[in-house]
Amino acid sequence: MKVFVTHSPEDLDAYYARALPDLQAIARVTLNPFDRDLSTEELIEAAAGCDVIVAHRATGGDAAVFEALPDLKAFLRCAVDISTIDVAAASSHGVLVARAAKSFVASTAELALGLLLATSRHIATSVVDYRSGTEPPQRPGLQLRGQTAGIIGYGAIGSYLAGLLSAIGMEVLVADPFVDEVEAPAVRVGFGQLLAEADVVFPLAQATADTENMIGAAELAAMKAGATLINVSRGELLDEGAVRSALDSGHLRAVGLDVGRAADQRPSAALAAHPQVVATPHLGGLTPQNADAQAASSVEQVGAMIAGLIPPRSVNAEDARRLREYWSR
């Protein structure tokens, strides 16, 4: 099989380098020829004649890709989020779409905890002061034990994070309309009650049309004065203008961000530069353990297709017409 890997050199080194020899051992591999993410037109040109695309999360799967590449049989997202892949268009052209394993849960939850610690104890500002040759003032921080954390969305990350926060002595409230029970000592509450009672809010819902700007001006006003907001999920969950206004007014004490509305879900530069914001450039899953596991999952998927099997974590297996025609030949 001919496989095109879309990762830029930076992302290839960070996310795929250790798994690349395993992929090259079972397939003919072509790499992204540019030092950046590809546009749709560049992707079409670079992947011409390939059977499989292994796509970094920054590579979209537009309808034009599936229409313009008649040899393409599978589009494998080397991440879990497939919101930028036109699955309906892929299915209509007989192209299989699959996602990576959920190996990022612990890494992302740990980063959320790290951002909470950083915003609570002025860690980042003290480091910057020292590195600039300035003696930082002794800024008072917040003890987290006894504080109340509010988690919106009790999925894999939310449930794991709840355990971490409980372990350091925080009270944990959970709001999720799709979950009937949560594991003690976390307590399930309504969305409004969570906003009103939480000292720190973690929006961890999926990004959908219904959850876009789920934390906007009204929701921020409903939060405690002096609360903290931590987002490691999706940038679309926050109304960034409203968040900035709440920071400027002092209603929000601090914000921790690993995601935003800039390219590749990175925090927006203007909001990240705010003095009350601690931001990281979408590093939630960037640990060797997670990166290697997700890269290895794509190698596993290519191996399955070579063996005549529908790969695990496929989302439209019934529509994989081109793959089945390939097997029959």
Image (cartoon, rainbow, N blue to C red):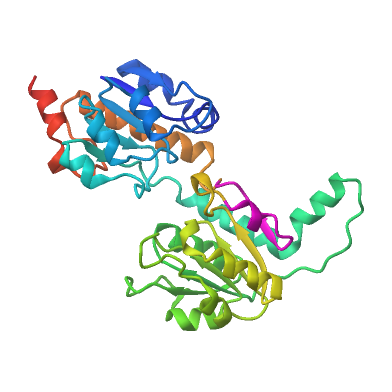
Answer above or below: position of 155 versus 5.
below
Answer above or below: position of 323 versus 244.
above
Quadrant where the C terminus lies?
top left
Give me the residue at 75% from left, 56% from top: 123
The picture quadrant where one finds residue 45 is top left
Question: In the depicted view, which residue is nearer to us: 23 or 34?
Answer: 34
Answer above or below: position of 163 versus 95.
below
Question: In the depicted view, which residue is nearer to us: 126 or 269?
Answer: 269
Give me the residue at 40% from left, 59% from top: 207
- Is residue 202 among the parts visible in the rendering? yes
Task: Determine whether, in the image, residue 253 is placed left or right of residue 106.
Answer: right
Task: Determine whether, in the image, residue 143 is placed left or right of residue 126.
Answer: left
The picture quadrant where one finds residue 41 is top left
Question: In the depicted view, which residue is nearer to us: 227 or 173?
Answer: 227
Please, which residue is most extreme toward the left here?
328
Marker count (numbered): 0
**Does 275 appear in magenta?**
yes
The picture quadrant where one finds residue 70 is top left
Residue extent of the magenta highlight: 267-282
Quadrant where the N terminus lies?
top left
- Is residue 144 among the parts visible in the rendering? no
Give me the residue at 42% from left, 41% from top: 57
Give me the residue at 35% from left, 43% from top: 101
- Counting from the top left corner in percent of width and height, residue 269 is at 63, 51
- Counting from the top left corner in percent of width and height, residue 159 is at 44, 63
- Counting from the top left corner in percent of width and height, residue 42 is at 40, 28
